[in-house]
Image: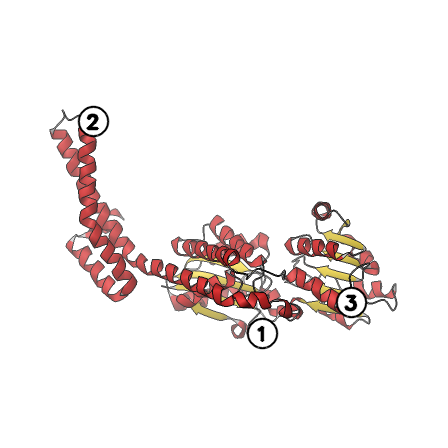
Amino acid sequence: MPILCLGLSHHTAPVDVRERHAFPAERMGEALTVLRTYDAVREAAMLATCGRLEIYAELDDYELGVEQIKAFLTQFRHGAVGYDLESYLYTLLGREAIEHLFRVTTGLDSMLIGEAEILGQVKDAYVQAHQVGALGASLHRLFGDAINAGKTARSKTCIGQESASVATAAIDLARARLGSLVGRKVLVVGAGKMGRTAGKRLYHEGVAELVIMNRTFERAQALVDEIGFGKALSLEHVSVSLVHADIVVTSTGASSFMVSVPMVAAAMAQRPQRPLFIIDIAVPRDVDPAVAQIADVSLVDIDGLRDVVDERLEVRREAIPHVEAIVAEYVARFSEWYRSRLAVPVIASLTQKADAIRTSEIERLFARCPDLSERERTLIAGASMTIVSRLLHSAVVKIRDKAVADREGALESTRLLEELFELRSQADART
């Protein structure tokens, strides 16, 4: 069966749906292990970012496999959902799925075109799937090619020029709303990749105070040391820090709200007439959306950042045709390899049988000629391998070419070879 991509993204689902189906990194291995227990799922990988959750799989049975993956999305961690999940999902099959992953990895499908984070996120998805044994030959090759396509796009085009990640977009939005950030007091909640990018950018914007918070104080302190500016605190100090901050940027990836309505309301009561601007770039969200109803509080979530960098991405948009050409080249290359896999079993059986016959005959010859020197034995063995290789070469090439150009014709050819050389009975004997 062909490769499948089933998922939801910022194109099809709002943040409140995406956060319901977010998978924390520490449970990704468990999720993939569960997914692989479904009968129809031969191999699988899962790409989870703030903008998408996508499952890539090779299935033994298409209809059953799609049904099982949808059941997995509904049941793992979440239980029943209070909405029609089907209305947010998309299913891509075969070449469409392959091309989609290449477009994702090169940044063409991102909320912010050419974002820097996505290539690393695809690498992480590949590593996680590999570590739990969820990858087979197909997805191993697909993700490897996709990562190479992403690297090629970033090195040979300007798709990655002009800084515009989710974190930098948040800072751009703060500056657009508040004017210069010089002299502002900023609280960054979360010291991961997003928090690191935001913290460094805020330092260069000239903020007066920068507080970095994280679940583990040591990680917050490490980021402060890396930036060379700011103060590290643990998350238990969020309430107090809200009283002093002009801007809050959150990106923890926690499974529940880190900033609640009572927390913000209490902070605002201690700072009357002084506005607070909160940017929540986490999925699941860190800040209760109801916080936006509090006087003098402005709240923007990740979906609210879409238009922030539009005017800054003209250079990247100019690169789109060049990146699409790179994607098309990689898609064609992978598709050719994928179609040629049809011929792999019969080629392997044919070469194994030929080599087994060669080895047996060489051993009989050596037994009859015990006086042969080591050099003579080596020359005879080498000549026998050359004969077999040359004899099979044209057949192997034609079978591969046939598999790429004509699937039905290739199937007929492989059946004929199996019958002529009794390859199927040989394979049955090995199992």
What crowding class fits label 3: few (fewer than 14 Cα within 10 Å), some (14-19), or many (20 or more)? few
Taking the spot 38% from the left edge, 59% from the top edge, the residue there is 334
Residue 206 appears in which quarter of the rendering? Answer: bottom right
Question: Which numbered marker is on residue 233?
Answer: none
What residue would you read off at disc 2?
374
Spatial CA span between label 3 and label 1? 37 Å
Spatial CA span between label 3 and label 2? 84 Å
Q: What amino acid type is highlighted by mark number 3?
A: Leu
Taking the spot 84% from the left edge, 65% from the top edge, the residue there is 268
Please indicate, yes or no, whether residue 36 appears anywhere in the rendered image: no
Residue 323, compared with residue 233, is above or below; it is below
Looking at the rendered image, the quarter that the N terminus falls into is bottom left
What residue would you read off at disc 3?
178
Taking the spot 71% from the left edge, 60% from the top edge, the residue there is 250
Judge by depth and name the residue closer to the eye, 337 or 413: 337
Describe the element under mark 3 as helix, strand or loop: helix
Residue 245 appears in which quarter of the rendering? Answer: bottom right
Describe the element under mark 1 as helix, strand or loop: loop
Instruction: Specify whether 289 is left or right of 54.
Output: right
Give the number of the mark in front: 3 or 2. 3
What residue would you read off at disc 1?
83
